[in-house]
Amino acid sequence: MSILLTGGAGYIGSHTAVSMLQAGIDVVLADNFVNSSPKVLARIEAITGVRPTLIEADLCDREAVRAIFRAHEISGVVHFAGLKAVGESVAQPLRYYRNNLDSALTVLEVMREFGRTQFVFSSSATVYGDQPAPLTESAQTGGCSNPYGWTKFMIEEILKSAAAAGPQLSVVLLRYFNPVGAHESGLIGENPNGTPNNLMPYITQVAVGRREKLTVFGDDYDTPDGSGVRDYIHVCDLAEGHLAALRYAESHTGCEVFNLGTGRGSSVFEMVRTFGEVNGVDVPYVIGPRRAGDLAAVYADPAKAQQVLGWTAKRSLADMCRDAWNFQRRNPNGYE
Ligand code: NAD
Ligand code: UDP
């Protein structure tokens, strides 16, 4: 039996594929490469010694998804596939709602046709909207500030309803905080198209000389140093969280939700400082205005994942900075 990783060629999917293969779990990856490259497959093979099946498919295409389930014995799905750029979702809301909702619904419906019940979903801390940290899973959701966030909220609601209606279904909603870093081999990592929206890839591109300087979006927040605070989590810790979630799904039905974060907030200035110290490179920056829609401080209460899944993030901010830089340095132009 295999686990289907939709969006498996992407940043988090590829790291999860490595964790699963190294744990002896067979995986099938499906991706349409809208934000990734098939070249990641050789990298996964170089790390694990296993070349998993990678299928080019649009997960909104019902026949293509059926073909995957026909060709492979899929016992469970981790649904990473989705568009994720916040700004783009504001400019192209229909594309985001169509792609993210349609792919989730299609995969769920085909799973049901084939009698499959385990579904782990890549959700996001963005579903909490503007609420005081630390955020627990019982905090209210909604109040998202962009269409991307609403797609996560809506898919969560769809999954809750489906699990309530079909008692054999086993759904795990994973609310990721801020995944950063890369596999320690430097072979796989984050490889955004165009100008990075997120802090860590922007920092690594400044450090490697692709961009002149970082703009710190606001230094007048109500935080210890005035810059925004987030819960950065090493992508390999996050990947391992998916193994724990799958094990949970195998032995429980219904719908459970878990935060995947460290519980520790770090500021933009702390990140820039740590990156410079760990890697011995300078990251020039200027202070700019606040970015629209940004919150002062967002971090998790990760206790539930620790208590119920037995999972906890182990890697430090220094590890995240070192590994992100290692990947960027070895792959100045991504996988190309
Ligand atoms: P990513 O863009 O690297 O990976 C997503 C993958 O899905 C890409 O390879 C893309 O080509 C693929 N894809 C998109 N639509 C598809 C479709 N219709 N059919 C087939 N493939 C499709 O992003 P990521 O950072 O690895 O994120 C994975 C998931 O986690 C996403 O759902 C994202 O919203 C969610 N998430 C990410 C973050 C983050 O900061 N990276 C935070 C919270 C949640
Ligand atoms: N940030 C910044 N400059 C950048 C990108 C991000 O100062 O070029 C800040 C941003 O304001 C926030 C933090 O870094 O406080 C993390 O931003 P990111 O976009 O990575 O994550 P998100 O805001 O979605 O949690």
Image: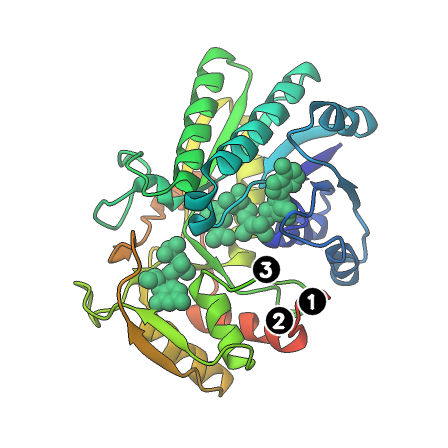
Q: Name the residue under label 3.
A: 193
Q: Secondary structure beneath disc 2?
A: helix
Q: Tags 2 and 3 in contact by the CB under 8 Å rule?
A: no
- Answer whether residue 12 is visible to the viewer in this image: no
Residue 327 in sight in this render: yes
Cα separation between marks 3 and 1: 18 Å
- Left or right of residue 314, residue 328 in this image: right
Dot 3 lies on which element?
loop
Where 202 falls versus 7 (above or below)? below
In this rendering, the count of numbered labels is 3
Q: Are marks 1 and 2 in contact (CB under 8 Å)?
A: yes
Residue 110 position within the rendered picture, expressed as x and y whole percent measured from the top left: 67, 20
Q: Which numbered circle lies on residue 187?
A: 1
Q: In this view, does 279 lie to the left or right of 8?
A: left
What amino acid is at disc 1?
A: Leu
Q: Is mark 1 on a helix, strand or loop?
A: loop
- Kind of residue indicated by mark 2: Phe
The quarter of the picture where the N terminus appears is top right
Q: Residue at x 48, y 41 (%)?
A: 92
Marked residue nearer the N-terminal end (3 or 1) = 1
User: Residue 30, located in which quarter of the rendered image?
Assistant: top right
Earlier residue among tags 2 and 3: 3
For label 3, count other residues whose C-alpha is less than 10 Å away and answer few (under 14), some (14-19) or many (20+): few
Which residue lies under the disc numbered 2? 327
Alpha carbon separation for disc pair 2 and 3? 15 Å
Q: Please tell me which residue is depicted at 62% across the width and 71% down the height of the picture.
A: 327
From the top left corner, tell me how far across and down residue 141 is, in percent: 31, 34
Is the residue at mark 2 in contact range of ligand 1, meaning its CB lies under 8 Å from it? no
- On screen, 105 above or below 261? above
Query: Quick one: 328 or 181, which is closer to the camera?
Result: 328
